[in-house]
Image (cartoon, helix red, strand yellow):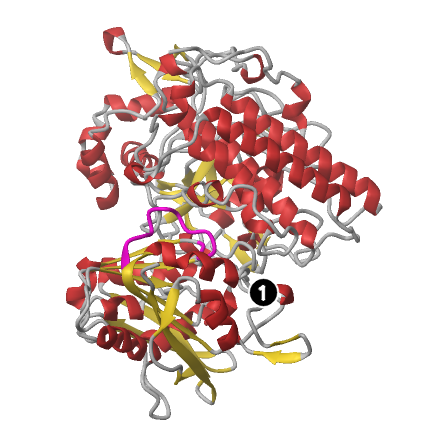
Amino acid sequence: MQERSQENWRTDPELRRTRTIVLNHGDAESKRAEILRYFLATFDIDEALLEVLKYDETFYLRADPLRHPLIFYFGHTAVFYINKLIPAQLIDRRINPVYESIFAVGVDEMSWDDLDEAHYDWPTVDEVQAYRNAVRERVVQLIKTLPLTMPITWESPWWVIMMGIEHARIHLETSSVLIRQLPLDHVRTHPLWEICHPMGEPPENQLLPVTSGPVQLGKAKDNALYGWDNEFGRFAEQVDSFGAGRMLVSNREFLGFIEDGGYRTQKWWSEEGWNWRQYEKAEHPRFWRPAGSGGYRLRCMVEEINMPWDWPVEVNHLEAKAFCNWKSAVSGKPLRLPTEAEWYRLRDSLVDTDQPYWPEAPGNINLEHYASSCPVTKFKFGDFFDVIGNVWQWTETPIAGFKGFEIHPYYDDFSTPTFDTRHNLIKGGSWISTGNEATRDSRYAFRRHFYQHAGFRYIESAKKVSIVADTCEMDDSIARYCEFHYGRTYFDVPNFPKTLAQLCLDLVQNRVKHSALDLGCSVGRAGFELARGFDHVTGLDFSARLIQVGVELLEQGFTRYPLPEEGELYSFREVTLEDLDLDAMREKVAFYQADACNLKELYTGYDLILAANLIDRLYDPRKLLTMIHERLNPGGLLVIASPYSWDETITEKGKWLGGIRKDGEPYTTLTALHEVLAPNFEPVGDALKIPFVLRITQNRFEHTLSEVTVWEKSDS
């Protein structure tokens, strides 16, 4: 293999000293220049990180079977800008639609992530680099020309630009974890990524008191800093006093758990943890490497070193919990991980500044000190060490939204797919946590078996932590769709998705019924119904929040959702596939997240495509309709249902299909459909209108007519 060139390595140490932007202070033109610098530094350090990959071939190795290879993330951080700026109507054309599809989704092991490598023909490293260069140029031009009014808020178009920058900062860290899992002979040292060299033996850990007091969390919308949706809202708790480890748990302290048979003693582990341990056959933390005479070495990002016993141990949540259970037994003290509120009680009592305001990072964070962990006694905060920085700290708390939580319209699936009690919060940041990640209010969570640069601090508290599994954690809009698809009928109007699916099945009664596509599937009812007649049904939707319901039904056979009744009063409903006579359809249905206007190549070969109430919710409906024939088999049917409710906040007026005046005359969407589809389709029958009722509250309903047209793919 030919080693990648080192000729143009990025080595400017200033790349490691950038900080997130204050968005509510300063004049517009100075802020524009500041954001441009932040964007360029973020783009550069993203590429500088991947310079440690030794060969082009290294980009295509799967470091973790639950993640894409690094070539995906090389493209993903650039694609993200384009895929957010287009629906935000800040740019009007794509750079490379294929790349902006294949590099779009793949962060967590969600069931709708497509990790099947057989579906991907990855471009070369040089091709992705050329694409990144084009994105850089496009975004730079936008930053230089987009009107800017201060302050920059959640509603500002500049928030979307900041979203792209801070998103890339997240992947700087997650990619470094993947690099750490690559074969050692596929990575190389780099002057920008030098590790900490001081190491030795840590002192014995001690429990120190943390006094009781109030904790208040949640940002207001006028906060000075960019934030992800889960940071906003309100949360308050009176935290009882507790004891906390003076230091993070070190490699040396964790060794005691290993030497006492901790990985082979089931009683220390939760059921989930023991299942993971058995599956992985784990005997020690992932980044430990057995050495001679029962010793260990440590794999850092790009090198392997003698075990630094005074560095913090890096483990997943399951290992941290098992250690705490063991430590409780051998010490006779009630030890566990802190809750999110308890962590903040410690943090706020000792840290009185925040990034970007500090003169220098007070801990090993924001890349201001090392490109690795460092001794647990290096950074002192009062009587404690590493209150922030060095490694992330696992908590007992699964992530959920604060009171008043709202999604951002241009990233509706950043947080809500993790509100499933399976993703626990990590706090405090690591050595490579930068930008928003290194701020007080940041809230990031990972599945309990995932590895980040994360360790833990144990606390002593007899207070039990109660985690309530609430699958009803969804906002009103998703709950309405659940009721619309799976709930009761109202005013004798039949269930709309079921009615549409039956219409489709009637249409294909004497046709091939191998594969169907439910495009814009929402929470999935039509897909399940289509499976009564088709061998396989694929459901695609842009919103992971909607897909999540369908996936839950596939996995569990049921879902629960809240029904708004009046004001803040709710009832709750559970529906099962068995009750709907759909349980047998589960093996024939799959749901994935996708952009209908930019579908991956693999979504093709269908005998029927249903697009229900979709076209007037797309940012470019004409683009979908001019390419949809490519996804159908010869003679396949396209069924379109829509109330034609055009809305400029969703589709810019210039891209409406109809509902406008053309050459001074009324121009309807139905007329447009005939014109746009004519080159590739023949209409089947006349348009018909199907009613549906959407329940808002117990006393408020919306009655709508959706016009349904059927089109057969022509032979030409």
Rendering coords of residue 116 (x, y %): 29, 40
For image coordinates 49% across by 77% down, the residue present is 670
Q: Is residue 599 magenta?
A: yes
Position of 499 relative to 388 (above/below):
below
The amino acid pointed to by label 1 is Thr
Q: Quadrant of residue 58?
A: top left
In this view, the residue farthest toward the top is 292
How many callouts does the rendering have? 1
Q: Quadrant of the C terminus?
A: bottom left
Q: Main secondary structure of the magenta part?
A: loop
Kindly indicate the quadrant of the structure image that contains residue 614. Answer: bottom left
Check the image and name the residue furthest to the left.
Answer: 584
Image location of residue 466, percent across then percent down: 36, 56
Q: Residue at x 36, y 89 (%)?
A: 490
Which contiguous range is marked in magenta?
Answer: 595-606
Pointer 1: what residue? 651
